[in-house]
Image (cartoon, coloured by chain):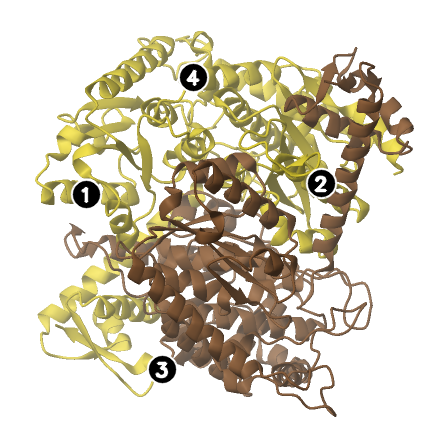
Chain colours: A yellow, B brown
Amino acid sequence: MKPLQLWQRYQKYLYDNDTLGLRLDISRMNFTETFLKKMQPRVKEAFKAMVALEAGDLANPPPPRGEGRMVGHYWLRAPQLAAKPDPRKRPHIPANANYCKEIEDTLLRIKKFAADVHATGQFENLLVIGIGGSALGPQFVANALTTPADKLRSFFFDNTDPDGMERTLARLDLAKTLAIVISKGGSTPETRNGMLVAADAYKRAGLDFAKHAVAITMTGSSLDKQSQSWLAQFPMWDWVGGRTSETSAVGLLPAALQGFDIDGLLKGARLMDEATRVKDFRKNPAMLLALMWFKAGDGKGKKDMVILPYKDRLEFFTRYLQQLIMESIGKERDLKGRKVNQGIAVYGNKGSTDQHAYVQQLRDGVNNFFATFIEVLKDGGNPLEVEPDATCGDYLSGFFQGTRRALYENGRESITITIRHVCPGSVGKLIALYERAVGFYAALVGINAYHQPGVQAGKKAADVVLGIQRQILNHLRANHGKFFSADAIAKAIKQPGEVETVFRICEHLAANERGVKQQAGKTVCDAAYAAA
Amino acid sequence: MKPLQLWQRYQKYLYDNDTLGLRLDISRMNFTETFLKKMQPRVKEAFKAMVALEAGDLANPPPPRGEGRMVGHYWLRAPQLAAKPDPRKRPHIPANANYCKEIEDTLLRIKKFAADVHATGQFENLLVIGIGGSALGPQFVANALTTPADKLRSFFFDNTDPDGMERTLARLDLAKTLAIVISKGGSTPETRNGMLVAADAYKRAGLDFAKHAVAITMTGSSLDKQSQSWLAQFPMWDWVGGRTSETSAVGLLPAALQGFDIDGLLKGARLMDEATRVKDFRKNPAMLLALMWFKAGDGKGKKDMVILPYKDRLEFFTRYLQQLIMESIGKERDLKGRKVNQGIAVYGNKGSTDQHAYVQQLRDGVNNFFATFIEVLKDGGNPLEVEPDATCGDYLSGFFQGTRRALYENGRESITITIRHVCPGSVGKLIALYERAVGFYAALVGINAYHQPGVQAGKKAADVVLGIQRQILNHLRANHGKFFSADAIAKAIKQPGEVETVFRICEHLAANERGVKQQAGKTVCDAAYAAA
């Protein structure tokens, strides 16, 4: 398309909302009016499904297609919209439920708790212990909004790597560190392990963990029971999914403690929620996004989504979106139970840094992606002119336009989102925009965006492995002094097919001197193991 | 495949090198002996090309297929192998060249400089200013090897985002900060800009930048000229590419200053280089990797490469590999000039964290990838038992095995690399393994891995944008007080097709109050601009 035609197309399809301070440019995606027209029945269905979801229907349908839960993250920004008991239409809502009040009370408690913590001046650091949705949102927001004026500095345990935890602990004066343990169900092993390692570290420092810890979890969970004597407890709700929990206590408590404007963040999300309820899809940025994702990948995820925010503060947004999009959309079956193997692969870091990494491939190589540029108008930082009439920010802006142009010239599609600056409000808007787009896209392709059966499968498989590890240790201890090959152990513990698993477990135990010693064999697979 | 068959396959194809302390398991990739046999002619050619490359041929061929350079990163770990002048066979090597001595002298100078810096005790922080290959290697190594005993703590300017730079500066006492400016050609704008912002910050702190700065660049570059009076200068060579520069001064100087064992890193890389010169492809881990990449994506990059290191310290390895692989392989044309649009998309962060992000999609969703697990046998950290007979490290290991199993059961392929622990040696080995694998893969698919024409295109496009910005400013200043639409400006500066570019530049300039003011129009595209 010639430049002036492209400019016409830009103006025709531009979504510009001055109140939101956000623009969405889809002119460089190869869709036609015919495509938009063809999609209308699906668009209508998607809007209908979203209305039902916001009203409190079991949008996450009962098993086997889902978890039989409501999906209420939009209520967190507009509590008065939360579903109310309705024995006829929504019998799944308990008669005494008052979600609106719970949301409002929690927000007030978060603000009061943060103010109290700031008032005492006891704490300088925040150690957030969580994984997945309990880490990615807080990490994204912490990185996006941090300034030297932060009231607490944030650190994370987001894995069960003991070495990683030790590295983080080495940077902390625990007497001045407030720990937040975040686990919706309370039983995620990585988070449980992180909590135990943290508690052990506090103990070894002569400190009482309970006096330094806060829990965010569902009422009645194991974490809820364990944390009764801690500084505070905040609720998670059945109807908020992990990957859409940034505007619940999961995201708001760490943000408030760091001193960020959580009302601004909530307001941004609320404004975007309103903008993405608009039924005219041409005036709905989330539906436009979802339609473009559909077009790019033929509704089957045939193209990867490359996210390129031209701002260091948004570097973690891609990782946040990886979870939000891939965990929501990456599903085996559609809502009718048919095998569809849906998904969209998401990757990226930041511009212009990534231009010196993989943009070579994006421009010249395999055309298996579409890019999403995020432009931030306000530069911030030092306005030094590095050349006459050119600042560092002009260069960043020039690289953004240049790369976008270079991709277009080579037939690579791109979407561009423009925001004014990175602040609590725009962060809330970006989160809400993608939450809604994911919901719409899932409806367009007919899948449930709100469960994650594959995550459970991985956990179960890990449990099998740890179960075999216990059997191995028992067998070796019961036969102290004797060496067994992996093959012999597998047979002895009545798991003859699990030789490789046994072998890998024994190698790991021996390497860590965990009660197992290794005797080399002719080849690595012939090694033998005994209790040490 | 049944578990015992899989165990047979594991043993049959396992690459295990006890000296290297590295295993490569390709048993869960769906290749056959027929495939391996069919690939033999290409394998032979790839080995031949690699021998020529190591001997100093112009493996990066002359334009338009390449840059007409030698590719010498393997010499950095074994200087005696460096190409020598040979007027008949290699007329491109100057008669007075002594690369071996240059490499050895530079290494000695790096060690001496680091020892001197440590001896003075003046510096606590290291500010590395670089982008692409001048940042990703140092970032990966810094993150992999950092301990509380680091002699200097590392920080990075890896972009031209002024706000990002300001955030980094806010954390630094510049009097105690040593800056390293890394730019091979000396003219990369992001790095030049970073240097100017850093120099400005030192100046405003009343400090002399020259007394706090070191340069790594090619002799004769603009940076070389500018840095004559700095604390030190270290060379880059024409025959070392940015993305394979970690074992040159680019990687070694920051590593040595942080107090890491650079001899260990070099030795690890050298040992891997030796192991990947073995002509029997079954005993060559880099050729096995390259063959698996070929098999997975049909030699056309049809499948994404997902990197899952189960260790926090290796989290940056994926970003390092994104550049190494995508910039090397993502090429439009093959060596014969045919349009092939090659590439492999690479993404990932770390396990088990990513299990709570996108492993849902990997297991259940679109099967458009193959995974590479990196297992680290030694756990480190707190050996606390979080349950009887189970540590955090056992969980990490269990999740690794569990996820691998869950993927396999759903027909998703994976490669597994096992190392003993993360140390200078194993980091050197991983780098050298992938450097060689990328070279082999490029030969298997017939492309030049050692140039990056698309990066130049992005830079050029950015220059065009900045050029238009200057024209806009000149036009508005010459017509002070008058407002012009983007359309009118584009016509006035004789770039009538560039309305969108002009519009975006004006919006950016106005948002930053950079001498341009905006007057709203009926729609955003009708806004008008004047000199402020």
Give x and y (percent) for residue A310.
Answer: 60, 37
Q: Chain of mark 2?
A: A
CB within 8 Å, label 1 to label 3: no
Which comes before the other along the chain, label 2 or label 1? 1
CA gap between label 3 and label 2 equals 48 Å
Q: Amino acid at mark 3?
A: Thr
Q: Say if residue A271 shows up in the picture.
A: yes
Query: Foreground residue, A225 or B248?
Result: B248
Give x and y (percent) for residue A274.
Answer: 57, 13
Q: Amino acid at mark 2?
A: Ala
What residue is disc 1 on? A196
Circle 3 residues within 10 Å: few <14, some 14–19, many ≥20: few
Q: Amino acid at mark 4?
A: Leu
What residue is disc 3 on? B19
What residue is disc 4 on? A76
Q: Nearer the viewer, mark 4 or mark 3?
A: 3
Residue at the (35%, 10%) spot, across then down:
A104
